[in-house]
Image (cartoon, rainbow, N blue to C red):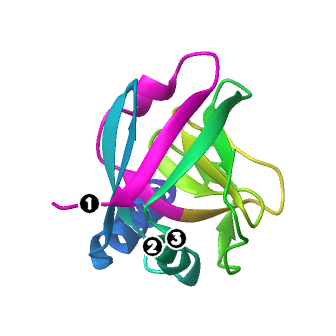
Amino acid sequence: MLRFALTLTVSMATMDYAIAQDRITISSDWGTVDAVLTDNEAASALLDLLPITLDMRDHLRQEKTGKLPISLPRSERRLDFSPGTIGLWGSNDFVVYYREGEVPWPGIVVLGHAEGDVAIFDRPGRVSVRIERSER
């Protein structure tokens, strides 16, 4: 029973990404990844900001985080993330997770999931990233 519930949860999370057709590209001097956005108000609001360049810093050796110029709308939050999860911690704290883990309550708003090797961000230090709509 537990195995079935876990499989169902993963499948539903994958469906959230598959429903959305909007894609973004996150590029830096360290490399580029594409991402599929989820179907929620926060992800739609992010698209309205693009293209944008963010200065990001490493946080807790699990993510790169940077400040958006405005707050995005509230959307459903969750506590867990996997490598490639793109989200919001605060209303304008954009994050790219390169490891698996959990965050404390109230959780993160998931904006999408990267389809590429986010290990490019698994290095200390700051990085400037350009986020724009994907042409793919």
Residue 49, numbered circle? 3
> Residue type at mark 3?
Leu
In the displayed structure, 86 sits above or below 11; it is above
Task: For marks 3 and 1, give the CA distance.
Answer: 14 Å
The residue drawn where x is 54% and y is 44% is 96
The nearer-to-camera label among 3 and 1 is: 3
> Residue type at mark 2?
Leu
Structural crowding at the residue carrying mark 2, measured as other residues with C-alpha within 10 Å and reported as few (<14), some (14–19) or many (≥20): some
Image quadrant where residue 18 sits = bottom left
In the displayed structure, 55 sits above or below 113; it is above
Of labels 3 and 1, earlier in sequence is 3
Horizontal arrangement in the rendering, residue 47 relative to residue 100 (left or right): left
Residue 100: x, y in percent? 56, 36
The residue singled out by tag 1 in the image is 134
> Residue type at mark 1?
Ser
Of labels 1 and 2, earlier in sequence is 2
**Residues in magenta, as a range:** 111-136
